[in-house]
């Protein structure tokens, strides 16, 4: 047990030093950027995730079937994306004055801590896009659909093809139609990481937790000594 605590303490000191080396004055550059993979944790039931701009100008999944009454939660990735509702005929522009719009979400790394939740009220197709004009996200294929028609020529491929031809893109005038708030996955995964991570089988969760606390305290002490 003593050696475990010592290891944890050393780890804490190392982390503290690492954190210290990067900061120039500001001490609060947070560890929240270490957000776990968005697929790592379960969402509340009835909530369906769409990743926005995760490694490319796209939505994942770009086509999603969602029951009436459920919610789609959009999670934002770097650097600056948004979600707005279009009509099938005009992929890169707001459907009308009441088209939903998340606003542009600025994310530096990982998954943004703010999400956009959209309630699904019918089985009608919902076509959407990212209106970022820099690098023409919509025209590059950053479009998606919820509850696509089961047949016919209104497909996500046709929507994407039409988007390529759009000469401009634009966003709705105001954020509306959904809820901008704390992202479910980011919040729940940081909470569950501490309790569910086996930490290499070091021992019971309580022992690990108290060891970590000692580590943090010793790490703070280490910084104090270093300064
Ligand atoms: C706006 O467009 C959407 C998508 O076509 C449609 O479902 C909605 O009824 C329209 N709203 C108004 C007020 O026209
Ligand atoms: C889709 O089908 C309709 C008739 O069902 C037709 O009028 C329209 O031109 C078709 N659009 C495309 C892009 O093929
Ligand atoms: C896009 O533009 C090309 C060339 O102008 C045209 O051939 C094609 O039919 C257009 N596609 C759509 C989906 O509008
Ligand atoms: C569903 O209804 C809610 C409440 O009126 C509204 O805020 C939301 O924008 C609607 N969802 C869609 C996809 O239009
Ligand atoms: Cu985008």
Image: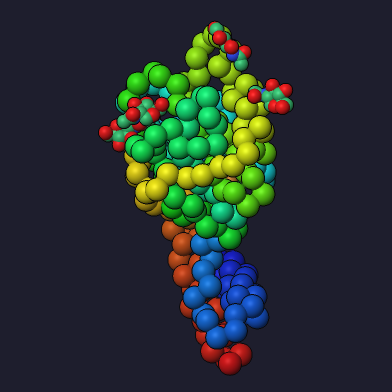
In this view, 227 is above or below 2: below
At x 45%, y 66%, the residue is: 210
In this view, 81 is above or below 123: below
At x 47%, y 45%, the residue is: 171
Which residue is at the front of the view, 33 or 200? 33
Judge whether residue 37 can be spotted in this image: no
Which residue is at the front of the view, 91 or 176? 91
Which residue is at the front of the view, 152 or 217? 152
Q: Is residue 105 left or right of residue 140?
A: left
Q: Could you say where residue 41 lies in the image, as x and y percent from the top left?
A: 50, 41
At x 54%, y 89%, the residue is: 224
Quadrant containing the N terminus in the rendered view: bottom right
At x 64%, y 78%, the residue is: 22
Residue 99 occupies quadrant: top left
Q: Could you say where residue 159 lies in the image, as x and y percent from the top left?
A: 59, 25
Q: Could you say where residue 2 lies in the image, as x and y percent from the top left?
A: 57, 71
| Count of residue discs | 0
Q: Could you say where residue 81 lies in the image, as x and y percent from the top left?
A: 55, 49
Which quarter holds ligand 3? top right
């Amino acid at each position: 047990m003593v050696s475990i605590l010592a290891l944890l303490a050393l780890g804490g000191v190392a982390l503290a030093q690492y954190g210290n080396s990067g900061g120039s004055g500001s001490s609060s550059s947070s560890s929240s950027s270490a957000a776990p993979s968005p697929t790592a944790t379960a969402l509340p039931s009835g909530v369906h995730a769409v990743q926005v701009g995760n490694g490319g100008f796209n939505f994942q999944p770009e086509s999603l079937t969602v029951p009436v009454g459920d919610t789609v939660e959009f999670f934002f990735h770097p650097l600056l994306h948004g979600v707005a509702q279009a009509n099938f005929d005009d992929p890169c522009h707001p459907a009308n004055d009441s088209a939903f719009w998340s606003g542009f979400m600025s994310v530096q790394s990982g998954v943004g801590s703010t999400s956009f939740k959209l309630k699904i009220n019918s089985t009608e197709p919902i076509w959407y896009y990212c209106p970022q004009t820099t690098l023409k996200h919509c025209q590059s294929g950053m479009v998606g659909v919820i509850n696509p028609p089961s047949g016919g020529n209104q497909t996500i491929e046709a929507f994407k093809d039409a988007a390529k031809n759009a000469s401009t893109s634009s966003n709705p005038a105001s954020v509306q139609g959904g809820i901008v708030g704390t992202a479910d996955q980011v919040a729940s995964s940081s909470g569950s990481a501490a309790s569910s991570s086996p930490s290499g089988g070091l021992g019971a969760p309580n022992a690990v937790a108290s060891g970590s606390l000692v580590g943090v305290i010793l790490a703070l002490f280490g910084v104090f000594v270093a300064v």
